[in-house]
Image: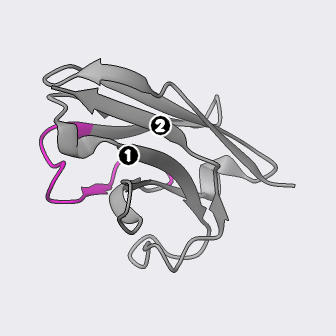
């Protein structure tokens, strides 16, 4: 049974930093493309960042490029999202996701496994 468990969410002031983590189990983590999505209140879930097997290739949504960094530790079966220069509009539930087939096709409607999410709140 695949499990993705997020942690590290919380309340942070605008301009601050936060790192969220996702521990994976039940899958061959080193062969899974990993991603982060987020869903703000009243909005649809959106792509944030993704990373390939080795960690050498990453991609980001334009809204977070230059502020967020996705990384992974295959020895710990964990993927991270470092978030800097946070803005109130970054407030959302952040979801960890695993896609087993295609890095280029990672999207909300093309994910094999989802975590339950962790709430990040950015205050003024």
Direction front: furthest residue: 42
Q: Secondary structure at mark 2?
A: strand
In the rendered view, does 71 fall on the left or right side of 30?
left
Q: Is residue 54 visible?
A: no
What residue would you read off at disc 2? Answer: 119
In the rendered view, does 19 fall on the left or right side of 31?
left
Tell me the magenta residue range.
Answer: 53-68
Direction right: furthest residue: 1
What residue would you read off at disc 1? Answer: 92
**Dividing the picture into quarters, in which one does residue 122 lie?**
top left
Q: Is residue 2 visible?
A: yes
Q: Main secondary structure of the magenta part?
A: loop
Whole-percent x and y of residue 121? 35, 32
**Dividing the picture into quarters, in which one does residue 46 lie?**
bottom left
Q: Nearer the viewer, residue 15 or 41?
A: 41
* Magenta-span inclusion, residue 59: yes
CB under 8 Å between callouts 2 and 1? Answer: yes
**Dividing the picture into quarters, in which one does residue 15 lie?**
top left
Q: Nearer the viewer, residue 85 or 65?
A: 85
């Amino acid at each position: 049974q695949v499990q993705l468990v997020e942690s590290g969410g919380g309340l942070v002031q605008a301009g601050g930093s936060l790192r969220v983590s996702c521990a994976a189990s039940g899958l061959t983590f080193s062969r899974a493309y990993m991603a982060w999505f987020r869903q703000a209140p009243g909005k649809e879930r959106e792509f944030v960042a993704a990373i390939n097997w080795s960690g050498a290739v990453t991609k980001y949504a334009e809204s977070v490029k230059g502020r967020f960094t996705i990384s992974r530790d295959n020895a710990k079966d964990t993927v991270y999202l470092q978030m800097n220069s946070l803005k109130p509009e970054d407030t959302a539930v952040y979801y960890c996701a695993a896609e087993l087939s295609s890095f280029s096709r990672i999207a909300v409607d093309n994910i094999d496994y989802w975590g339950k999410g962790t709430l990040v709140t950015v205050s003024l």
